[in-house]
Image (cartoon, helix red, strand yellow):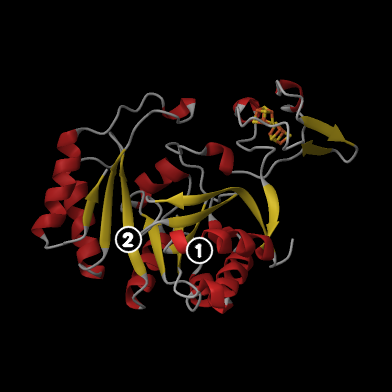
Amino acid sequence: MNATQGLVNNTIRFSAVDGPGNRFVVFTQGCNFNCITCHNPYTITECTDCGVCVGSCPEDALTIEAGPLVLVDRSACTDCDICIDVCPEDSTPLARYLTVAALVDEIRTVRPFISGVTLSGGEATQQPDFVRALFGAIKADDELTGLSTMVDSNGSAPLAVWEDLADVIDGAMIDLKALDPDVHVQLTARGNTEVLRTIEYLADIGKLEEVRLLIVPGYNDDVATSERTAAWLHRVDPDMGVKIIGYRAHGVRDEASHVPDATPEALAAFTDAFRRRRFTRITVV
Ligand code: SF4
Ligand code: SF4
């Protein structure tokens, strides 16, 4: 792989939930977290070409060649997702390498209808050269002038990565899975030291678009956590956007099926904790 192409799970031409305005979204494949609450677990790992999914396709769109290498006949694929359901690796045979040039061409076709481009995932910053190349190409393209470039990220990239991307990113939406490092490990299998540093750094340079809080019952939904989280983010920057997201069990892996949906009371407690600290850009979903 080189900087001019990225491993992409999917693209969406119009989204109103992946940053401000109407956005073209590129979902990258591969994530360094393993969140028990992940609603898109098939974006976590890169396909190993094991071949397990090949026989499952009702359209015979999948074949395996010597290598081994699993190939997709996209003209036959009906997006039924059966291959994703049977994959034992949290992957998909449908992810593919796309060039920056091809993505820029596609973005040009919808330019009049969008306000920006978001790189989401998976975890886009796992492919930092691709992020820089795509956003740099958008910034340099006369036909794409005015489009904002945003990353939707788990925040775990090292500071050096964010510093390198700072001039091509207009903003970032960062997930804070838990302020408590032990709870963060329980939820993601990774610590949160880099995440907290990323939030502070992006706020410092004026590029923290939003912090996203997934409220997960039994893990991070208590009143004390809501107060500590709001207080810490207030110290960082009370002008940041905050999105409070209630966990929903639908679509998650079996290991999280025991976790109930977030309660209205928990969402209200978080909302209240931020309102009392004069945050003005609060969204609850
Ligand atoms: S999503 Fe496409 S490739 Fe996968 S099983 Fe369905 S038809 Fe086959
Ligand atoms: S998508 Fe999953 S099951 Fe199919 S070849 Fe790749 S790793 Fe194997």
Q: Left or right: where does residue 242 sit relative to residue 277?
A: right
Between residues 2 and 157, which one lies in front from this camera angle? 2
Question: Does the image show residue 277?
Answer: yes
Say the numbered circle drawn on residue 210.
2
Instruction: Look at the picture and state if 248 lies above or below 29.
Output: above
| Quadrant assignment for ligand 2 | top right
Question: Does the image show residue 151?
Answer: no
Q: Left or right: where does residue 255 sit relative to residue 216?
A: right
Of pointers 1 and 2, the one earlier in the residue sequence: 1
- Which quadrant of the view contains residue 64? top right
Residue 6 placement (x, y as % from top left): 66, 58
Instruction: Look at the picture and state if 52 lies above or below 159.
Output: above
Q: Is mark 1 within 8 Å of ligand 1?
A: no
- Which quadrant of the view contains residue 174? bottom left
Q: Mark 1 points at which residue?
A: 111
| Circle 1: element type | helix
Between residues 208 and 82, which one lies in front from this camera angle? 82
Number of other residues with Cα within 10 Å of mark 2, as a class: few under 14, some 14 to 19, many 20 or more:
many
Q: Quadrant of the N terminus?
A: bottom right
Number of other residues with Cα within 10 Å of mark 1, as a class: few under 14, some 14 to 19, many 20 or more:
some
Q: Which one is in front in this view, the residue at disc 1 or the one at disc 2?
A: 1
Q: Left or right: where does residue 42 sit relative to residue 22?
A: right
| Circle 2: element type | strand
Please state which amino acid type lies under the numbered disc 2.
Glu
Q: Residue at x 69, y 56 (%)?
A: 98
